[in-house]
Image (cartoon, rainbow, N blue to C red):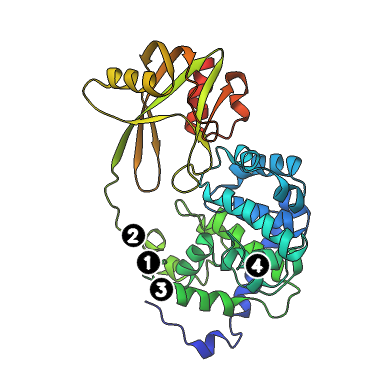
Amino acid sequence: MTKVNKTEALSGSHTSFSEAIIQWQKKHGRHGLPWQQSRDAYRVWLSEVMLQQTQVATVIPYYERFLASFPDVISLANASSEQVMAHWSGLGYYTRARNLHACAKQVVKEYNGVFPPEPELLAQLPGIGRSTAAAIAAFSYGVRAAILDSNVKRVFTRAFGIDGITSSKAIENELWLRAESLMPEGVKQIQSYTQGLMDLGATLCARTKPRCSDCPLQNRCVALATNRVADLPAKKLKRAIPTKKIVMLILLKDQHVLLEKRPDCGIWGGLFSLPELLFNEQGMTKQASLHIERHFGHLDSITPMRKVLHGFSHYKLEITPYRCNLTARSNTISEDTHVWYPLEQCEQAPLPAPIKKLLLGMMA
């Protein structure tokens, strides 16, 4: 592991590094992204949260729809959770949406709808970590603060030849020291530098197929000089991913489908989905029929559909959908947790992407 002398790192001896990033960003970086057209902290915050673990091309239409419905933090704070989740549906990592809503409410309550400029205060808000807080402060208020997202970690580990898993405490501490020491002096260039680091990691210094020949750091990159670009950052050992099998019931009556609200915690937290049963290899259709008659209404017909596979970070989900036509609905279904939703409006419903795709495909 490459060691960093703290005194040297904090001395500002890496000025040429920041200058290289700044000059490259001004000529070759991204300048036309929707959230770059304003320094409004609300818009910067919204984009930074959406961009966590999500590609720019995927984020742009969601960002624009969000702004159309919630143009400021007050309108977002006043929205219902169902409205927020419906706008987030398909973007994934739904904890971000719940934190987004909670953060908006807290900013309105504690800061009168104005995001504070201090990174330390921003980092105390729901869903905003140290790096995101720094990005918001830098882009919105020109505050000199260091970022360290996954793209920046990749740039640093390759540029300085840093071995080890980046999520380990020792390596992360070293990377934060690098991040803080490499910033340009003063605040004049902090926005170009911060954007340049993000752009470099997202475009040239990509995880696969990096374009080293176009990189402004190629003459100082340790990984390139030692032929270790493909090896850095160090990769975690892959674990076998288990598969969870479930049955989902598509309960239909009068062009409506029964949706069930999921708990706030866990996968798809706060979204609506379809009622579930644990999968059983034997007699599943009979079990599903009995469950429907007991809880949801009188069954007319039940038909198994093609399986749906969906991957999460820690496991795979295998869904066996059953199309279930009812002759009558049960009067005992809880209105707090269930809703009969018009099929024709499912595209706007707060549903997980695979469930929305399933329902829309069934209607096609």
Residue hosting label 1: 165
In the foreground, 126 or 6: 126
Residue hosting label 4: 122
Query: Label 2 sits on what residue type?
Result: Lys
- Look at the image and tell me whether residue 7 can be seen: yes
Which secondary structure, mark 1?
loop
Q: Quadrant of residue 303?
A: top left
Q: Looking at the rendering, in which quadrant would you find the N terminus?
A: bottom left
Residue at mark 2 to residue at mark 4: CA–CA distance: 31 Å
CB-based contact (under 8 Å), mark 2 and mark 1: yes
Q: Which mark is residue 236?
A: 2
> Which is closer to the viewer, label 2 or label 3?
3
Query: Label 3 sits on what residue type?
Result: Lys
CB-based contact (under 8 Å), mark 1 and mark 4: no
Q: Which mark is residue 169?
A: 3
> Which is closer to the viewer, label 3 or label 4?
4
**Residue 187 pos. (x, y %):** 73, 75
Label whose residue precedes the other's in the sequence (2 or 4): 4
> Which is closer to the viewer, label 3 or label 1?
3
Query: Label 4 sits on what residue type?
Result: Leu
In the foreground, 140 or 296: 296
Label whose residue precedes the other's in the sequence (2 or 1): 1
**Number of other residues with Cα within 10 Å of mark 3, as a class: few under 14, some 14 to 19, many 20 or more:** few
CB-based contact (under 8 Å), mark 3 and mark 4: no
Residue at mark 2 to residue at mark 3: CA–CA distance: 14 Å
Task: Say whether residue 289 is left or right of residue 211.
Answer: left
Residue at mark 3 to residue at mark 4: CA–CA distance: 23 Å
Label whose residue precedes the other's in the sequence (1 or 4): 4
Q: Quadrant of residue 364?
A: top right
